[in-house]
Image (cartoon, helix red, strand yellow):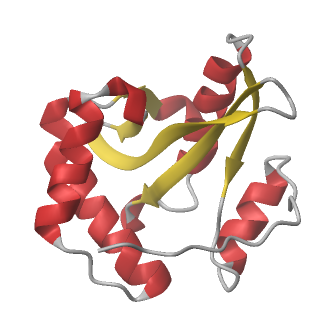
Amino acid sequence: MQDQIKIRDAVRADADTLIEFNMCMAKETEDKALDPKILTAGVNAVFENPAHGFYLVAEIDGDVAGALMVTTEWSDWRNGQFWWIQSVYVAPAFRRKSVFRALYEKVRERAGKSEQVCGCRLYVERENSTAQATYSQLGMTDAGYRVFEEMFS
């Protein structure tokens, strides 16, 4: 199946799909309803300012099967960038068909071509054991950190 998956950079025409995927992912993983207006502006901001990151999409037979976003974080400890994998979503009809594997392999391939990138990271809900198992099978390990935040209006 993986040889049927085409990975490409997302384009602005993919924005509606990316917005839908983000809405579904937030509902499925955190039972959160995202504000469509804010999410739409956020997705479009990535296309308007490449410094925010980039999206990759996976296609099977012309259908967008999954997507993810990559953002960067500078590490002074390593004098390099971590690529953060975010907004991961695979449409239900395409799950268990190596879609995330193909997306992740493309991220790793691209990251490996850059002397600036020192590693890839992502965060996952503590209760999402399915995703954690997938990430482990791909060679990722638990970094041992917990994420704290303070949100501003």
- Rendering coords of residue 143 (x, y %): 86, 58
Q: Nearer the viewer, residue 95 or 49?
A: 49
Of 80 and 53, the residue lying toward us: 80
- Relative to 86, say whether 28 is above or below: below
**Which residue is drawn at the image coordinates 43% and 34% (left, top)?**
53
Asked if residue 98 shows in the view, the reply is no
Q: Position of residue 46 (x, y in %)?
A: 30, 37
Residue 93 versus residue 149 in the image, above or below: above
Q: Quadrant of the C terminus?
A: bottom left
Instruction: Left or right? Give the position of 55 relative to 83.
Output: left
Q: Is residue 11 above or below residue 102?
A: above
Q: Quadrant of residue 36?
A: bottom left
The quadrant in which the N terminus is found is: top right
Q: Is residue 133 left or right of residue 57?
A: right
Q: Residue at x 60, y 30 (%)?
A: 107
x and y percentages locating residue 119 in the rendered image: 77, 34
Q: Position of residue 45 (x, y in %)?
A: 23, 40
Residue at 24% over, 31% down: 47
The residue at the point 50 percent across, 62 percent down is 95
How many numbered discs, if any?
A: 0
Q: Is residue 135 above or below residue 147?
A: above
Q: Is residue 153 visible?
A: yes
Camera-nearest residue between 82 and 142? 82
Horizontal placement of 7 versus 63: left or right? right
Tell me which corner region of the image, top left, top right, bottom left or bottom right, holds residue 26.
bottom left
